[in-house]
Amino acid sequence: MLLNEVIDPALINSYPMVYDFLARLLINLITTFILVRFIYYPHNGQKELLFTFVIIGLVVFMIASVLNRVKIEFAMAIGMFAVFSIIRYRTPPFEIKEMTYLFAVIGISVINALVEPRVNEWLAFTVANTLLLFVSFSLEKYTPKKNVSKKLLTLSVTELAILNNNQQLTEEIKSQTGLNVFKVDVIKISAAKKEV
């Protein structure tokens, strides 16, 4: 079987289109890799998500490229993305930061896939890639280091009257746990056990 029997000869002769696609694919892979490996991973350390982010970026790039090149009905395109959103609901929940990185990878992949091979649009997509990397790096590197965490505690109090004074309750929690507490919310009270 000859190559021109399998592939349209017009496609074989359109080398600029193939080179354009490969250049955009390479730039997308490089941008995604830099974002995930050198910006996300050193500050978050979840190596399990490295594979996920890169592959999702690649798949979204391919799908967006095909949808941009092939005449497909809008309803069919929406249906394809609906399938991917259903898959999202069957996975374990991500933290907000991981979801933000996932959205950044998807967004930059769509931008890179839909760029037309004109100089002004290549400039815009280069600026978009660079800006995403710069802002992500800056926010990861220069975010405040004060770490505030939320903890759910079951605490035995000496007297239930302490619940009326937020400052005394905060001091009680500090003395019992050794944690630096600055805000307390009482969710449930057990008068029989004297627990809050």
Image: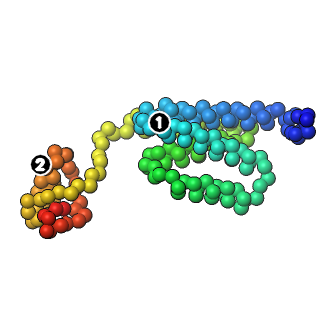
Element type at mark 1: loop
In the image, taking residue 47 as reference, residue 57 lies left or right, namely right
Around disc 2, counting alpha carbons within 10 Å, would you say few (fewer than 14), some (14 to 19), or many (20 or more)?
A: few
Q: Where is residue 106 in the image (x, y as percent from the top left)?
A: 58, 46
In the image, taking residue 9 as reference, residue 139 lies left or right, namely left
Around disc 1, counting alpha carbons within 10 Å, would you say few (fewer than 14), some (14 to 19), or many (20 or more)?
A: few
As rendered, which of 14 and 36 lies closer to the eye?
36
Q: Name the residue at 57% across, 38% down.
A: 54
Residue topped by disc 1: 47
Residue topped by disc 2: 175
Q: Name the residue at 59% across, 43% down.
A: 56
- Colour pattern of the rendering: rainbow
Mark 2 belongs to which amino acid? Ser
Q: Position of residue 101 (x, y in %)?
A: 50, 43
- Is 134 drawn above or below residue 156 in the view shown? above
Q: Position of residue 182 (x, y in %)?
A: 21, 51
- Is 166 drawn above or below residue 33 in the view shown? below
Question: Could you give the CA–CA distance between mark 1 and mark 2, rounded to whole angstroms?
Answer: 38 Å
Marks 1,2: beta carbons within 8 A? no
> In this rendering, which labeled residue sits more in front, label 1 or label 2?
1
Can residue 115 be spotted in the picture? yes
User: Disc 1 or 2, which lies upstream in sequence?
Assistant: 1
Which numbered circle lies on residue 159?
none
Mark 1 belongs to which amino acid? Lys
Q: Name the residue at 76% across, 32% down.
A: 19
Can residue 167 be spotted in the picture? no
In the image, taking residue 111 as reference, residue 118 lies left or right, namely right
Element type at mark 2: helix
As rendered, which of 147 and 55 lies closer to the eye?
55
Q: Assign the N terminus to one quadrant of the image.
A: top right
Q: Position of residue 98 (x, y in %)?
A: 47, 45
